[in-house]
Amino acid sequence: MLDVAINHHQGDFHLQASFTAVAGLTALFGRSGSGKTTLVNVIAGLVKPQQGRVTVDGQTLIDTAAHRFVPPHRRRVGYVFQEGRLFPHLTVRQNLRYGRWFTPAPERRARFDDVVALLGIGGLLDRHPASLSGGEKQRVAIGRALLASPRILLMDEPLAALDDARKAEILPYIERLRDEAGIPIVYVSHAVAEVVRLATTVVMMEGGRVAAAGPAAEVMARLDGLPLTRAEAGALLDAQVREADDGYGLSLIATPAGDLRVPNVGLQVGARLRVQILARDVMIARTPPEGVSALNMLQGRIAEIGEPLGASVVLRLDCFGLPVLAQITRRSLETLNLQVGEAVTAVIKSVTFAGR
């Protein structure tokens, strides 16, 4: 577990942030200049705050009240930057083993072969960085960090320098890392798509402060967070493949909010995945409609009506305890006379595969 409580001035910028992260991936999410990288550098020991406390698994790294500051090289923190920063004169194998040199032998938990298999870099071991793609370099950089057996892994926008093809290449490996590494990961990003796909916990930063923090599905569905996520506001649902309808090229997936039919996801029955339902792809009906092409409808109650956003407004529905967002026009809101607490049907036009 990671506990952070920081109060720090850096020039005209004031960082005042507190949050707790557990095993899984915690996304520090927000606009450029919101304080994400400064906060990560405080955790790493690269920035010494004026006031604050940082603990990892009960070990105090910073406690300004007690005048305690563990230097970076003694923190056992793995750090992956935007660029891999690999040693060009060393092979991939040598770059990976470099991470182990600074970890005492009794504390080396990560096994070389396990890390290589986890990241799919077995075929790269004898190559030099100059011959690697951007995605391959980042996988090697992650492996080097893991082989130092860190207590926590920090990733500062590790996909920012990659094109879409290379991002698609590396995202499944970061998912595996989240699910199998067994250590907290703090992941800095301003890309909604990455946060939706990867995060188990989201810490939304704005102006040096934590605007919202909690499970990804809850934070991304908060209406007061929409200025940061407006274009891709929606619900995140963890799901499981229930059956495959090969005749129509569809998969039936089960979520706590209800079953959904989606284009074939190419996964076996029983496989788990994450889907996103964008608010702009949800219509509201007072009663379940008939004779429509939409395959998916969820029953729920209106839990919140957001502030107007131009001609539209976003509603948050409670669908068996899960939040689902719907973006409708203000005219529709008034015409249907929708009120908080009313039972409605969410008619879903599209469901997006968001990760596993």
Image (cartoon, helix red, strand yellow):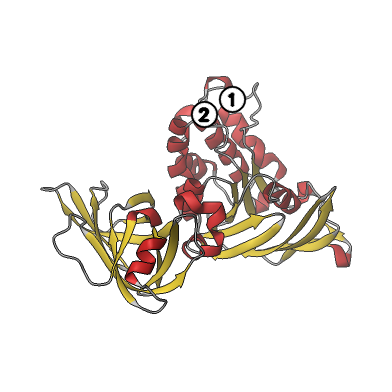
Is residue 112 something one can see in this rendering? Answer: yes
Q: Which residue is mark 2?
A: 125
N-terminal of the pair, mark 1 or mark 2, is 1
Query: Distance of mark 1 from mark 2, alpha carbons?
Result: 7 Å
Q: Is residue 245 above or below residue 101?
A: below
Type of amino acid under label 2: Leu
Type of amino acid under label 1: Thr
Q: Residue at x 66, y 64 (%)?
A: 19
Q: Nearer the viewer, residue 75 or 346?
A: 346
Residue 344 image point, x, y percent: 30, 72
Q: Which residue is mark 1?
A: 91
Q: Which image quarter: residue 84?
A: top right
Residue 146 image point, x, y percent: 59, 45
User: What SS does tag 2 mark?
Assistant: loop
Q: Quadrant of the N terminus?
A: bottom right
Instruction: Kindly indicate whether the residue at mark 2 contacts the one at mark 1 (C-beta within 8 angstroms).
Output: yes
Q: Nearer the viewer, residue 47 or 10?
A: 10
Residue 165 got which mark? Answer: none
Q: Residue at x 30, y 60 (%)?
A: 240
Category of crowding for the residue at label 1, using alpha-carbon neighbours closer than 10 angstroms: few (below 14), some (14–19), many (at least 20): some
Residue 204 image point, x, y percent: 60, 57
Residue farthest to the left, as pictured: 247
Q: Nearer the viewer, residue 126 or 234?
A: 234
Q: Residue at x 27, y 62 (%)?
A: 347
Viewed as shown, does residue 276 lie left or right of 8?
left
Q: Residue at x 55, y 35 (%)?
A: 138
Residue 122 image point, x, y percent: 46, 33
